[in-house]
Image (cartoon, rainbow, N blue to C red):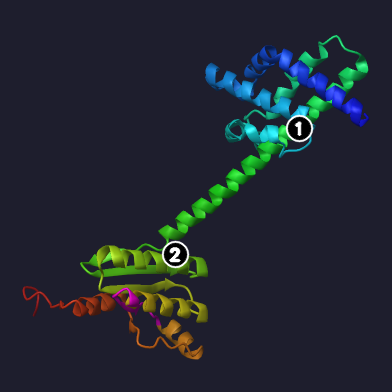
Amino acid sequence: MTAGTGQTIRDRVAQFLKENRSDIERAWAATPVFTARRPADAAEECAELLTGLRHVIETGGEEDPSADGLATVRPVLASLAARSAGGPSGSDRPDVTVLKGPLLRLWREQDLPEDIVHSGDLVLSNVLNTLRIALLEIELSAGAETILAQRAQLTELSTPVIKLWDGILAIPLIGTLDSTRGQVATESLLEQIVAHQARVAILDITGVTAVDTLVAQHLLKTAVAARLMGAECIISGIRPQIAQTMVQLGIDLGEVATRATLADAFARALGIIGLTVRPDERTAG
């Protein structure tokens, strides 16, 4: 098709979509894509989708997933993507390309020359294929956003700040401590120091698999930040293997207090706030 002929075909197809709006919307609403929807919702979505596709064709963007017409119906596309598009192989979820069948059938029922019918078939097929691509892009984007959100939630959950006593907080660090987890841990601890007016913060690294220079720097920075917020910091859970590694790496924790176990750190923290732990006289001896 030449440029002029192509525009003429698009105009014919756009006019067809406008004149046969009711029949197209009714046919689409009967497809598996919309049958699970309430009739009123299905009718509304079909109408919005058809308007968007007509605009795409009028502007010659039937092969462009980012065309303005598709952008205007993004809420409908998001709804379609969530419940129908991009199903895995063998999935029972309907594919949006089922809309192509009834649309082409109605187009071919028009009393038009064969060459125009064929050209119109191409335009309508292209715009439905592009709709499919746009839906897949939305679905993939939504999946990526979900993964990032879940990762952020897991990072938050993996660095909980625990109140051990009035004025005493602890944050148990488990697994590998990377820069992201380290930043989240520091921010969470500082926020809770302010919220609880804590005087002591315990960083327990019993569950940390390995300590390298990066981890040690993070611990020191967290301790300094806690001190600036008015809380004394104690690092607990330094196992013999980790202690040897820190010595070999030349890591110096400076003035930061350290204890072998969380229990020892807690006892030290109680002493800082003016409390002591004594054996129960009823169980002594």
- Res 66 → quadrant: top right
Type of amino acid at the residue the image marks with label 2: Val
Query: Closer to the camera, 178 or 113?
Result: 113
- Spatial separation of the CA atoms under disc 1 and disc 2: 43 Å
- In this rendering, is residue 192 above or below 204? above
Relative horizontal placement of residue 101, taking residue 239 as reference (left or right) = right
> To which residue does mark 2 refer?
184
- The numbered mark at residue 236 is none
Residue 121 can be seen in this image:
no
Residue 283 can be seen in this image:
yes
- Res 92 → quadrant: top right
> To which residue does mark 1 refer?
129
Magenta part of the chain: 228-239
Query: Closer to the camera, 205 or 240?
Result: 205
- In this rendering, is residue 9 above or below 285? above
Of pointers 1 and 2, the one earlier in the residue sequence: 1
Residue 68, given in percent of the width and then of the height, sits at 69, 35
Q: Residue at x 67, y 42 (%)?
A: 137
Residue 115, given in percent of the width and then of the height, sits at 92, 19
At numbered mark 1, what does the secondary structure look like: helix, strand or loop?
A: helix
Across the whole image, how many numbered discs are drawn on residues? 2
Of the 4 image quadrants, the one containing the N terminus is top right
* Cβ atoms under marks 1 and 2 closer than 8 Å: no
Q: Residue at x 34, y 83 (%)?
A: 258
Query: Closer to the camera, 271 or 87?
Result: 271
Q: Residue at x 84, y 22 (%)?
A: 120
Residue 164, given in percent of the width and then of the height, sits at 25, 67
Of the 4 image quadrants, the one containing the C terminus is bottom left
Residue 212 on the magenta segment: no
